[in-house]
Image (cartoon, helix red, strand yellow):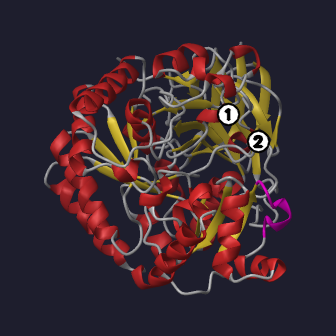
Amino acid sequence: MYDLLIKNGTIINGTGSPSFYADVAVKDGKIARIGKGLGEAKTVIDAKGLTVTPGFIDSHSHSENAILTYPGMIEKVEQGITTSVAGQCGSSPAPISRDANPEKAEQLGEYGKSTDIYRTFATFIDTIKDVPNGANTALLVGHGALRKAAMGMDNRAPTEAELEKMKALLEEGMEHGALGLSFGLFYTPGAYSTTEEAIELAKVVGRYHGIVAAHIRDESDRVIQAVDEFLSIVRASGTRGVISHHKSSGRTNWGKIHTTLRMIDQANAEGLDVYCDVYPYVASNTSLTSSFVPPALREKGAANVLRDPQLRAEIKEWNLKRRSGDLSYVQVSSCRAFPQYEGLRIPEIAEKMGVDQYEAVFTLIADSDDNANACYFTMCEEDVETVMAHPRSMICTDSGVARHLVVYHPRLRGSFPRVLGRYVRERKVTTLPEMIRKITSMPAAVYGFSTKGLLWEGMDADICIFDADTICDRAEYTDCGQRAVGLNYVIVNGEIVVKDAVYQGTLPGKVLLRSR
């Protein structure tokens, strides 16, 4: 007898091939058989009129900080995600910064102090490897974390000894199952690094046949140069590469995505192995500091420099040279000091504060001790669709889980149902079988998940069951918690974790380690 039998469904197996009608039998967390007349099971799901696919894989996630404290991964599984690739943008929790203060370390439940758990990637993996979660998670080592561990937040090139320490910490991470290395070249301290430093670290990953992913150095005026830099890192190191949440930000840069995608095509034609991912929204989300404080001044702490009247004036002048005084495209998503302003645009906040728009931004950053984030409506629909349709693009959320947040970017809840509803069914950016390939077998192959991403006998039973005629997102920028519709079941490692888009409380997910 099987553990689970899914009957009468329309199967899209993840290869990109057309759908077919069949039943799927699950036993011991694996897909046991696919066909008709398969026999009896303890649990039977009638999928008549529904589509049955492999579970969705979030190719760019920030779920690593939820593994111990919010293990249900609720916002992931409630949109069909069964596996996430985490530790992106250079920001893995391990190895810990050399400047971490043990006296201020957070106690993470029964697992211990954050300074102990995150000391190295090895201590992190040893803690989390057997912790049950709602979904599977795989991890990259963050370049920013390596830099902090070796040299803190210093704005300079590493010494030879510091570079060797970063290499050793990265090698340890690879030995303990990391998929590879993530860069956050837009963020500090990654922004302080040179291309040569990035290449030297990527070479370590190359020796393990791992992967490098990058939030490139610039996604706006210098996006073409930034893509060229990343391709040079991939070329010199011999690694597989992924350009994270690929976009061209700012009206004057719209359309540059056609050039960058041609660059990716040319790199692959010469023998490189390069991909990208994209989230299905025209707004990004990041800290106010990253957008409004020059990288060179972040070393001392953005909140600190903004409390200096002279530096504050210099930062305002720096911003006015780069953009207009109209910040209506910025909507605050979280702010520690001013939660009442979450969900509001900067002009409205400035009016309430009785100051100009830049002074409002600076106050949000300074008074929140650099804990303020916002959505930035700077992309165009055509660019999003162009990236999404590219044969080497995958889909991502660029998000973790909501935790205590009330306002956040809706991609955290709605990315995958939005892709299937808005972009496949309504806008016909690509076919349903092709999009299923982009969110299942393609990321599984790119990141090396050999038992996931396909509805084949013997594969892990990570499965989504949904109504292709109705599935869509409902989360909005100011009403973020709305669940998707049309998502009937999500199954992780053979266990039902979601029914009718509602998490059921089960924890069958695992931490996935790179095969060594």
Residue designated by label 1: 66
Q: Mark 2 Cα within 10 Å, few/some/many (few <14, many 20+)?
A: few
Q: Residue furthest right?
A: 340
Task: Check the image and name the residue furthest to the left.
Answer: 270
Q: Residue at x 67, y 76 (%)?
A: 359
Tell me the quadrant of the picture where the N terminus can be found.
top right
**Which residue occupies 47% across, 47% down?**
89
Residue 216 location (% of width, % of height): 37, 57
Magenta residue check for 340: yes
For the residue marked with disc 2, what is the amino acid? Arg
Determine contact: label 1, label 2, CB under 8 Å.
yes
Q: CA distance from mark 1 to mark 2?
A: 8 Å
Is residue 146 magenta-colored? no
Q: Residue 448's x, y, as percent?
A: 39, 31
Residue type at numbered disc 1? Ala
Q: Which residue is mark 2?
A: 403
Residue at coordinates 31% horizontally, 32% vertically from top-left? 210
- Secondary structure under badge 1? helix
Instruction: From the viewer's perspective, tell me whether residue 165 is left or right of residue 323.
Output: left
Magenta stretch mostly in which secondary structure? loop
Task: Specify few, some or many for label 1: CA neighbours under 10 Å numbering under 14, 14-19, or 20 or more.
Answer: some
Q: Is residue 149 above or below residue 80?
A: above
Residue 456 percent coordinates (x, y): 50, 30
Q: Horizontal and vertical percent for residue 160? A: 21, 31
Q: Earlier in the sequence, mark 1 or mark 2?
A: 1
Q: Which residues are magenta?
A: 336-343
Q: Is residue 130 left or right of residue 270?
A: right
Residue 246 visible to the viewer: yes
Find residue 118 and report its image quarter.
top right
Left or right of residue 31: residue 500: right
Q: Which mark is residue 51?
A: none
Q: What is the secondary structure assignment of the residue under circle 2?
A: loop
